Image (cartoon, rainbow, N blue to C red):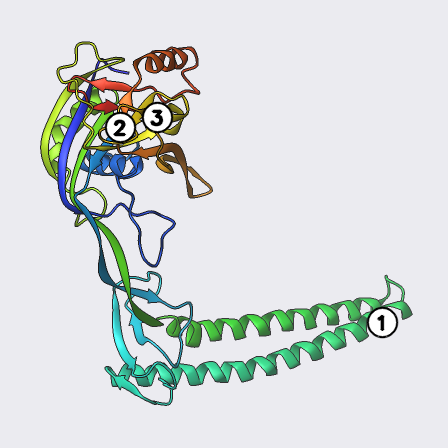
């Protein structure tokens, strides 16, 4: 670790740090995960490849509430009796590039094809959609005819194969039977290929541009009045890039979760309380701390505000994403086991023992606790 690391103090009027396992009603982490911070920093610096960095994050928020939003979802297939019938501008990409054709009026009993209880927005497109449905039905009937011909050819092939026994393999008759079998097989292949190509061009591709869109009311958990204290350790060039580009950092979380940079500076960090300028524990902040540090009982907290009794700190455990590797075109995240804590006092003796163990087995014990020169807890992950 460098003798000096970068500390960023910022505020957000509101923020949502989505828990990836929540889908319909989106829940938020109390502090941004490491990957969220690292991604925002990389975007601010214009990095297109990963620059390794370790991050410590702490902060607080004034309140938590829920905001309502309208969720739009495309169904897996086009439904005739519900939702909104739309035509995509590009069927290869499901996005907001669509044109509304018609809307179902009731929750059930509608029909775009028959015109039952629907609001027609684009009469011509709706007619084209109905024509494509008719063409699809025609191909379904034609498919039966193709399968019947294929079956007839397969039966003939089966009968011809039985005649092989009557002739010698080197005979003229045997060769004629073999040629007839090959001809029937080729007919089946050509018949099926032509049918599938006609169906794709005249039905599948045009119809794939139409989708059913549904809208529903969902909720976001949103934090208000957020303050974050972020420590970053990396190589000298990367820290300089972050320092020079910090005001390109416009948001953390969603794109609308704007940030206001309050303070940016290089700070020294220490193993203990010696030489720090402020001795208080900054207890108004909450932290992500390696769960291993809690298991080593490095941190304590008071049982009650006016009590002298203390117990070992506990917290809510999360497995947070940090960085990732690409495996089979999929992101495999490196997860960190951390605990979210809101009050602590550092046990200096335990801290010394913990840091000794860290030095002995650095690769396994990535849970070293530091303090910066103003007393902020630093636990780089």
Residue indicated by mark 1: 162
Residue 32, image quadrant: top left
Circles 2, 3 touching at the beta carbon (< 8 Å): no
Height in image: 212 above or below 104?
above
Task: Please state if 14 lies on the left or on the right of 79 as rendered.
Answer: left
Query: Which callout, 2 or 1, points at the residue further toward the start of the chain?
Result: 2
The alpha-carbon separation of the residues under discs 3 and 1 comes to: 87 Å
Residue 378 visible in the snapshot:
yes
Viewer-closest of 281 and 322: 281
Residue 131 image offset from top left, x and y in percent = 38, 85
Residue 258 visible in the snapshot:
no
Residue ID at (40%, 34%): 334
Residue 184 image offset from top left, x and y in percent = 69, 73
Viewer-closest of 133 and 203: 133
Could you classify mark 2 by the number of other residues whose Cα lies within 10 Å: few (under 14), some (14-19), or many (20 or more)? many
Residue ID at (37%, 15%): 354
Residue indicated by mark 2: 56
Could you classify mark 1 by the number of other residues whose Cα lies within 10 Å: few (under 14), some (14-19), or many (20 or more)? few
Residue ID at (23%, 31%): 305
Residue ID at (14%, 18%): 278
Query: Which callout, 2 or 3, points at the residue further toward the start of the chain?
Result: 2
Residue indicated by mark 3: 311
């Amino acid at each position: 670790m460098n003798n000096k690391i970068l500390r960023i103090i910022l505020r957000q009027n509101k923020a949502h740090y989505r828990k990836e396992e929540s889908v319909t009603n989106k829940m938020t982490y109390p502090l941004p995960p490491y990957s969220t911070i690292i991604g925002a920093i990389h975007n601010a610096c214009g990095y297109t490849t990963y620059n390794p960095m370790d991050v410590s994050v702490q902060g607080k928020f004034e309140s938590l509430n829920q905001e309502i939003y309208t969720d739009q979802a495309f169904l897996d297939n086009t439904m005739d009796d519900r939702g909104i019938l739309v035509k995509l501008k590009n069927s290869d990409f499901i996005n907001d590039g669509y044109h509304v054709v018609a809307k179902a009026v009731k929750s059930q009993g509608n029909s775009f094809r028959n015109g039952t209880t629907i609001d027609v927005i684009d009469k011509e497109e709706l007619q084209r959609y109905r024509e494509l449905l008719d063409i699809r039905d025609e191909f379904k009937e034609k498919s039966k005819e193709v399968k019947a011909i294929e079956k007839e050819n397969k039966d003939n092939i089966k009968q011809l194969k039985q005649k092989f026994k009557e002739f010698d393999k080197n005979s003229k008759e045997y060769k004629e039977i073999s040629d007839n079998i090959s001809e029937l097989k080729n007919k089946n292949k050509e018949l099926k290929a032509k049918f599938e190509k006609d169906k794709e061009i005249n039905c599948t591709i045009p119809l794939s541009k139409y989708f059913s869109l549904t809208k529903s009311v969902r909720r976001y958990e949103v934090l208000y009045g957020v303050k974050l204290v972020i420590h970053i350790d990396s190589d000298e060039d990367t820290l300089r890039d972050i320092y020079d580009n910090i005001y390109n950092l416009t948001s953390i979380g969603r794109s609308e979760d704007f940030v206001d940079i309050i303070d940016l500076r290089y700070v020294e960090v220490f193993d203990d309380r010696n030489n720090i300028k402020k001795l208080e524990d900054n207890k108004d902040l909450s932290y992500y701390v390696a769960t291993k540090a809690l298991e080593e009982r490095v941190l304590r907290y008071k049982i009650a505000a006016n009590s002298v009794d203390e117990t070992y700190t506990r917290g809510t455990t999360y497995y947070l994403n940090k960085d990732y590797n690409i495996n089979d075109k999929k992101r495999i995240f490196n997860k960190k086991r951390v605990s979210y804590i809101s009050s602590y006092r550092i046990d200096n003796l335990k801290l010394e023992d913990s840091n000794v163990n860290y030095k002995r087995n650095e690769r396994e014990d990535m849970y070293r606790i530091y303090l910066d020169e103003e007393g902020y807890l630093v636990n780089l992950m």
